[in-house]
Amino acid sequence: MEQHEVDVLIVGAGPAGAACGLSLRNHANKEVLIIDNSDLQHTRVGEHVTASIFEFMDYLNVADINQQSEFISENYGTTSYWGSQSANEHNSLFTAAGETYQLQRLEFDTTLLYNFVEAGGHVLLDCADIKFEQQVDNHWVVQLTHSVRGVIQIKTQFLVDASGRNAPVSKSLGLKRFKKDDLIGVGCFLDVSSLSLTHDQLIETTEFGWWYSANLPNQTAVVTFFTDMDLVKKHQLNKHENWNAALAKTFHMSKRVAGSQSLSDKLWLRNASSQLSDNVTVDNFVAIGDAAASFDPISSMGLGFAMSSGCFAAKAIHAAIEQESNQPLAVYHNDIERNFEQYSQTHKQVYQQETRWGDACFWQRRLS
Ligand SMILES: Cc1cc2nc3c(=O)[nH]c(=O)nc-3n(C[C@H](O)[C@H](O)[C@H](O)COP(=O)(O)OP(=O)(O)OC[C@H]3O[C@@H](n4cnc5c(N)ncnc54)[C@H](O)[C@@H]3O)c2cc1C
């Protein structure tokens, strides 16, 4: 059996894991391994970010992600029908922030990971059957089966959960998640080459939730319906014909995408619920990105938080190693909790702006 030892093992090669790994390499010179259970070829969703993302690129010495990168385009405005049948033009419903951008996620995520490897980090994909055991000295022994290399055992001082919204690592350690709602995104990518779309993003509410569409590079667009899981089941919105029928009932979204072609027969479904991990400090362990706290996509906060929590957790880990104390991790957890409280208040205010569907359960659930 292969055996290795690192300072920090990160589970999840998404933006949070890559940011944390890069930060630990560049600012603390730690030996870091990122493992992932996928080959990174899965469909990625979530692409609208504020300019703050570029400040993290500077901090992480990532020169090839900037406003000029070909996989990033400036968003020239969002038109929303949220709370009114009149169009509202803005950059974001959630913040008063200035410019916003659209990313191509595969390129963004893999460029971050490439920078991590260039900085001396290690990545192991296609890992299965990952098991974690904490030893009496608080170090971790992680055992996994790699698709080619077989069983591998890794000893690490720190374990980081960057495994996304379902937080399988935190769950396997018995940590609870506070879940505010059951929001789910049901969507598809469209070929819009035959259309001339007039605005970059469109948001439109309906009785059962809200629709979102954004132009992406390569003459494609994404269209997603955000609703609750029980409503998806009740109206079978995971079936293309029912989803199309719901889309046809919208005033603006249906017009925007009329004549486009879906790029796949199947719709994708993604957990989009707001969640917060238990504020419990497990020695030598930390969760980052969606695994620590996840946000309603109306906020466009997910990727920015993946970056910030990855960088701040790296600082906390470095301090914890230097001070031989888990106190910096407790400070990190409290910051996350404070962030989430602020987010929850803004979230409620945004949903309160839509009063037209007061009797509908989707909206009632978010106002109570
Ligand atoms: C429909 C939708 C739309 C969104 N829109 C936006 C948006 O416009 N703007 C925005 O900022 N955010 C948006 N988000 C949120 C954004 O996508 C996430 O916040 C972001 O991807 C979080 O990054 P992460 O690295 O924490 O997790 P992820 O990107 O989910 O990465 C997690 C990684 O962990 C791996 N993994 C999972 N389980 C395991 C396991 N058991 N073992 C090993 N590896 C594992 C996965 O393969 C993946 O590579 C949206 C989310 C959804 C669902």
Image (spheres, rainbow, N blue to C red):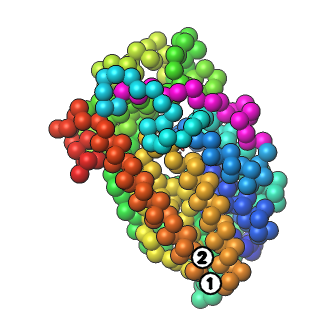
Residue on which the image places disc 1:
325
Residue on which the image places disc 2:
328
Residue drawn at the location 62% of the way across and 60% of the way down: 310
Q: Nearer the viewer, residue 298 or 258?
A: 298
How many numbered markers are drawn?
Answer: 2
**Percent position (x, y) of residue 317?**
65, 72
Per the rendering, the mark at residue 52 is: none
The local secondary structure at tag 1 comes to loop
Q: Residues within 10 Å of mark 2 (few under 14, many from 20)?
A: some
Q: Is residue 149 above or below residue 41?
A: below
Residue 341 relative to residue 112: left or right: left
Q: Is residue 236 above or below residue 130?
A: above
**Percent position (x, y) of residue 338?**
45, 64
Residue drawn at the location 45% of the way across and 71% of the way down: 279
The local secondary structure at tag 2 comes to helix
79 inside magenta stretch:
yes
Q: Quadrant of residue 312?
A: bottom right
Quarter the N terminus occupies: bottom right
Residue 181 relative to residue 133: left or right: left
Residue 183 relative to residue 331: left or right: left
Q: Which residues are magenta?
A: 64-81
